[in-house]
Image (cartoon, rainbow, N blue to C red):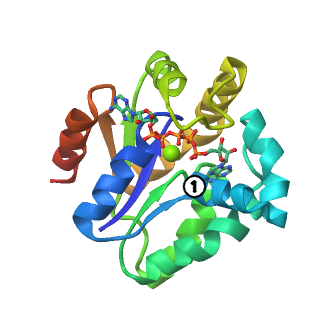
Amino acid sequence: MRIVLLGAPGAGKGTQGRALAEQFGVPHVSSGELLRAEMAADSDVGRQVRESIARGELVPDDLVLSVVGRAVNDAMQTGGYILDGFPRTLEQAKRAFELAEPAGIDADYAIYLAVPDDVVRERLARRAEGRVDDGDPAVVQRRLDLFHAETEPLLEFYRDRGILREVDASGTPEAVRENVLAALR
Ligand code: AP5
Ligand code: MG
């Protein structure tokens, strides 16, 4: 099973991605988690991305690819994957498709976890982990704005390929999970 998860910040990509990965026995590749691991390790890349992430800006494509490229590639070679947070620009989607399609390992489904901005704001304000990009409402708003501007155009990209499934992601995690599984049937 090869799935790309799309959705606003706080839509539940991580929550649903972990569960789907476990259910289907495929790797869950979260670009955000990989970038935060670089930050935690205080690596060169980690230092370069820290400011963008703290301000809610997107990390430049080349830097993202230097971090997630290998994980995505490794996951693709296993034959299955749940991608969470990548691709999130049209440029990233096109590059990923150009790499995966010739090998027959492009996504089977793009699941769009649809959730209103207000629900996102509540969820992120409540999150316990204390992420550097959750505390400031202006940063959360910037993440939302970038989602609408840069990531929403991907819906069209995947719709054109015939693999987009839109799911109501505003309910409980269990309800969202049911909606996702129904969309895959
Ligand atoms: P990333 O880590 O991908 O963050 P995000 O997209 O902003 O999304 P979140 O991780 O906040 O939310 P989620 O959808 O995973 O939801 P979750 O399950 O955690 O990216 C962070 C940053 O890294 C970006 O801003 C950018 O700077 C950079 N970056 C990453 N990828 C990049 C790329 N490809 N290109 C460029 N830059 C990139 O849920 C959120 C909270 O809500 C949790 O507390 C959870 O417990 C709770 N929750 C989940 N589902 C429900 C539910 N159904 N009901 C109630 N609560 C729920
Ligand atoms: Mg996440």
Residue at numbered disc 1: 33
Q: Quadrant of the N terminus?
A: bottom left
Q: Is residue 44 left or right of residue 172?
A: right
* Foreground of the two, 21 or 163: 21
- Residue sitting at x 46%, y 59%: 83
Q: Number of callouts in the render?
A: 1
- Residue sitting at x 33%, y 26%: 170
Q: Is residue 38 left or right of residue 29?
A: right
Q: Residues within 10 Å of mark 1 (few under 14, many from 20)?
A: some
Determine whether 89 is above or below 167 in the image.
below
- Residue sitting at x 64%, y 40%: 150
Residue 173, given in percent of the width and then of the height, sits at 28, 36
Residue 171, given in percent of the width and then of the height, sits at 27, 26
Q: Is residue 159 visible?
A: yes
Determine whether 135 is above or below 24 in the image.
above
**Amino acid type indicated by mark 1:** Glu
Which element is circle 1 on? helix
Residue 5, given in percent of the width and then of the height, sits at 42, 50
Q: Is residue 121 left or right of residue 39?
A: left
* Foreground of the two, 33 or 150: 33
- Residue sitting at x 79%, y 52%: 49
Q: Is mark 1 within 8 Å of ligand 1?
A: yes
Residue 152, given in percent of the width and then of the height, sits at 54, 37
Q: Is residue 110 visible?
A: no
